[in-house]
Image (cartoon, rainbow, N blue to C red):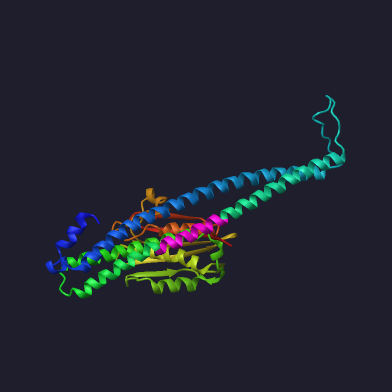
Amino acid sequence: MHSLLARQIRKFLTPQAQESQKIEKFLHAIDRSYHNFEEQFGMLQRAMDLSSNELFEANQKLQQEAEQQKKVIARLTDATKTLQTITIKNQQGNKHGSELSGIELAVMIEEQAYQISEAEKQRELLLQDLEKSNKELNDYAHVVSHDLKSPLRSINTLINWIKEDSERLEPTVKTNLDMIDQNIEKMDNLISGILEYSVIDDKSRNLESEIDLNQVVNDIIRLLQISDHITITSDISLPIIYADPARIKQIFQNLLNNAVNAIDKRKGEIIILFEDKEDFWQFGVKDNGKGISKKYHDKIFQMFQTLDTEKKSTGIGLSIVKKIVEFYHGTIWIESQEGIGTTFYFTLKK
């Protein structure tokens, strides 16, 4: 543990408490958990960065191969349609050239078909490798998440023991312990957020069913701690869609929670918007809060980026929202004016 932090904690303890073995165990547990957290959190970030780069490169390669296959198929289609009429000059013939017979043309088409078949096999193998890598990454994220949370729970337990055993703690000591407890909760939420982010693309977890969005929103409103001066309304009935309830709930819960936290006026108003487009549904969450400067409109969707000056936010909520929206082939964007309010729009493909 950092010597200044240890000395600061000891300064507010009684002489008897300073010599307590429980205090020594407590300080040792904090030291061990900080080192363990930083090491494994770094490993998780490196694994996620590596996997993202691999997936991006593989996706680029697949797109290039797909374009090549489209060109080959188009040529094969033309050759088949004009099989009886097309004239192809023999590249090894004389200057007048010679026509290829139907059999020779068929052989050429067969060779191209074989090349397409081989390319398809390679594509399937590549997809299998990607699925295997993605599964291994998800499994690793779960293991690391468990290993990171375990020391946090131990520290939380030790803090509670100290509070229970030391009835006459000085107010400053109690405040410091509460601050440690709050940071433990924040780290726990951050780890959970990273785990949720890492499994969004896992289609095996995509348990789709019919979802009444009116019911989803009502359930979220009941769970949120909303002050009496804030109202949440919707001018139109929301649709019933077919998707994974957990993922859709995460979208609305994050956006509504952000809207509630953004309210800085005596009368807070949050409106849920909806439009039924031809190929997709368009939703919006509008608030009359403090607004967001235009220079942050892209930054807020990045991992670990937050505008929360009190540092209570993990900075991962909107990243999760963006990734879920894109999982359903949608887009998300923001319109905001500082001092007036913000609207988050997003679409979901029908």
User: Is residue 239 toward the left or the right of residue 120 in the image?
Assistant: left
The one of 134 and 252 positioned closer to us in this rendering: 134
x then y, percent, for residue 15: 12, 66
| Residue 155 horizontal side relative to residue 136, left or right | left
Q: Which residue is drawn at 41% across and 72% down?
A: 221
Quarter that holds the C terminus: bottom right
Q: Please report the residue visible at 41 percent of the width from the left and 53 percent of the height from the top.
A: 43
In x, y percent, where is residue 145? 41, 62
Indicate the position of residue 210 as horizontal and vertical percent values.
56, 71
Occupied quadrant, residue 349: bottom right
Q: Between residues 55 and 234, which one lies in front from this camera angle?
A: 55
Q: What stretch is highlighted in magenta?
A: 131-146
| Residue 291 position in % (x across, y down) | 35, 56
Q: Is residue 70 above or below residue 314?
A: above
Main secondary-structure element of the magenta-colored stretch:
helix
Q: Nearer the viewer, residue 17 or 152?
A: 17
- Using the rendered image of the protein, determine whether residue 316 is visible from the camera's viewpoint: yes
Can residue 259 be seen here? The reply is no
Q: Nearer the viewer, residue 38 or 84?
A: 38
Quadrant of the image occupied by residue 288: bottom left
- In the image, taking residue 255 as reference, residue 208 lies left or right, namely right
Picture quarter with the N terminus: bottom left
Residue at point 57% right, 48% down? 58
